[in-house]
Structure formats: C-alpha cells, structure tokens
C-alpha cells in the first residue's frame, strides 16, 4: 500500500507586512497616526498596487517596506527575514534586492552627475569595465540612445529622466521594484509609454512590482492585485479586476468615479482639439 503523499508546503510570501502602525510625534500633546493595523502579503512575481489619495499613508508604507523608516508597531519581513528595526549594516542584501523609482525624476537625480555615473552608482566597487557594460545594457533596456551616458539630467525631457531613474534602479539587478507615483508628474502622452516600459521590464526580468498611485485606473493598467488605503488603513484589497468591477467600499467607489480612464485620456489627446 502506497503511503499518502504530504500536501505541498505553502509558498512563503516575498514581502509580508503584519499589523503595521506608524505614529509621528508632533508635540507633547499631538501625534499623527500615519498607519493603523496594515497587513498584507506580496508573492514573488506579483504586480501589487497601493492606491489612495494624498495623506492616505502610501508614502509612509513605502518607507517601511524599503526599511527607510521603522514602524511604531508591527513587522515587515522580506523572504521570511524581518527588516524592521534592523541596523543598516544588516540590510545590505535588501538594498540590492529592492529598489525604488520615485515620483520626481529631476529631484532624485543628481544634476551635477553625468547619466552614466548616476546609473552605475548603485553598483558599488565592481570593476569599471563591468560598469561600462552594465550602463550600456541598461540604456538600451530603457530605450535611451547609447550616448545618453555622457549627458546631464537637465538635458533630457521628463519622460527620459524617468527612464534614467528606472535604469538606475535596475542597475544592481533587484528582484523587487517599488514605483512610487512614477508617472504622476508626466504628461498624459508620456505616461502610457513609461507604464508600458515598466510592464515590459517587469515581465522580461521577472520582477516583483509594488506600484503606488492615487489613480486606481493607472493601477489597474499595471497591477493584478490592489490595496486601497484611506487614513492610514487598508479599506479594500483584492484582485484588481474584481475591485474595479465591484468595489465594495464607498471610498473605492469614490476613487473610481473621480479617476478618468487612462486610455480615454490618451484617445482624446490623439484626436486633438
């Protein structure tokens, strides 16, 4: 008689947040509760969206996921290892595995540095020849001319600068890319190009994507799962198609009603005045 096989072990989430709280003390009598009891898991290869208006707690949550801040309570784990409250020297693995693309490319790029130096800065002390090869590879990946490395950030358009930011984030070959409002500062005509580039890179490189936005329609274009935040809490979470088609929380319904369709906006732009 054959012994029954054991059930397969549950797959460990890549990122796990448990009961996250973050309070900021403004004075002896006043504190701001930026996050309240936030919990979720992100699987490897997932495209996870975090959506909410300004002040909803999105940026605070990103800082905790990237171990750039410490929660007041709760925990954040990466590949089963807690990263909250860990000293910087113990986070070297995370700094190469997880990278962030910020909202304002001009603000996140050093204007005094050439693009080649901006992109290769996260590579550390590897050989210069390897740097040169990697920079060329990344410029091609983000569809910028090969000679872009010789120029400075101010010589590029907003969309091109965001491509440089993406190239820099990809330099150390991360497994997770956090995109924090990466297209909100760009023209509508450029937004879809950057979103399509991100989707292509995520697919081609096998990345896990955490995409942060105030626009649920943009998140729908990019993500397969979404968490809706309001006043520091997750009020709704689930597969993006379900949340989009049947929003359960009034705040999600409000976000959907307020957000113009990305595709409709592009169609209007192509039609002209």
Image (spheres, rainbow, N blue to C red):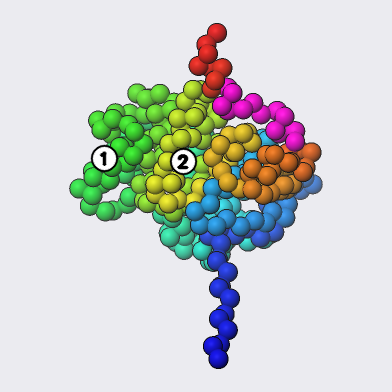
Q: Main secondary structure of the magenta part?
A: helix
At which x and y percent is residue 109?
41, 35
Q: Is residue 140 left or right of residue 267?
A: left
Residue mark closest to the camera, 1 vs 2: 2
In the image, farthest residue toward the left: 129
In the picture of the structure, the residue carrying the numbered disc 2 is: 199
Q: Position of residue 41 (x, y in %)?
A: 61, 57
| Residue located farthest toward the front when viewing the structure as drawn | 1
Q: Residue furthest top?
A: 273
Q: Residue placed at 50% from the left, 38% from the top?
A: 102
* Residues tagged 1 and 2 counted as in contact (Cβ below 8 A): no
Quadrant of the snapshot with the C terminus? top right
Q: Residue at x 70, y 33 (%)?
A: 256
* Residue ID at (22%, 52%): 127
- Few, some or many C-alpha atoms within 10 Å of disc 2 (few <14, some 14-19, many ≥20)? some
Dot 1 or dot 2, earlier in sequence: 1
Residue carrying label 1: 136
Rounded to the nearest whole Å, what is the CA distance between mark 1 and mark 2? Answer: 21 Å
**In magenta stretch: residue 255:** yes
Start-end of magenta stretch: 253-265
Residue at x-position 58% and y-position 34%: 218
């Amino acid at each position: 008689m054959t012994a029954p096989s054991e059930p397969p072990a549950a797959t460990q989430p890549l990122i796990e947040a448990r009961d996250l709280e973050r309070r900021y003390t403004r004075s002896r009598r006043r504190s701001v509760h930026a996050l309240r009891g936030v919990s979720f898991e992100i699987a490897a290869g997932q495209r996870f969206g975090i959506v909410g208006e300004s002040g909803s707690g999105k940026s605070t949550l990103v800082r905790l996921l990237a171990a750039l801040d410490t929660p007041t309570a709760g925990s954040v784990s990466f590949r089963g290892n807690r990263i909250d409250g860990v000293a910087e020297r113990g986070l070297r693995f995370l700094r190469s595995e997880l990278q962030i693309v910020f909202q304002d490319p001009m603000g996140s790029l050093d204007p005094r540095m050439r693009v080649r130096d901006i992109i290769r800065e996260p590579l550390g002390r590897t050989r210069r020849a390897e740097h040169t090869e990697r920079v060329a590879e990344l410029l091609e990946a983000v569809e910028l001319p090969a000679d872009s490395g010789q120029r400075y950030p101010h010589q590029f358009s907003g969309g091109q600068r965001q491509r440089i930011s993406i190239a820099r984030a990809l330099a150390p070959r991360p497994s997770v890319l956090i995109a924090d409002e990466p297209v909100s500062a760009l023209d509508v005509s450029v937004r879809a190009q950057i979103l399509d580039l991100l989707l292509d890179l995520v697919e081609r490189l096998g990345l896990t994507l955490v995409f942060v936005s105030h626009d649920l329609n943009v998140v729908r274009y990019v993500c397969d799962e979404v968490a809706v935040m309001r006043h520091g809490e997750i009020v709704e979470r689930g597969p993006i198609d379900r949340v989009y088609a049947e929003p359960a929380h009034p705040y999600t319904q409000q976000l959907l009603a307020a957000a113009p369709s990305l595709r409709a906006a592009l169609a209007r732009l192509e039609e002209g005045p």
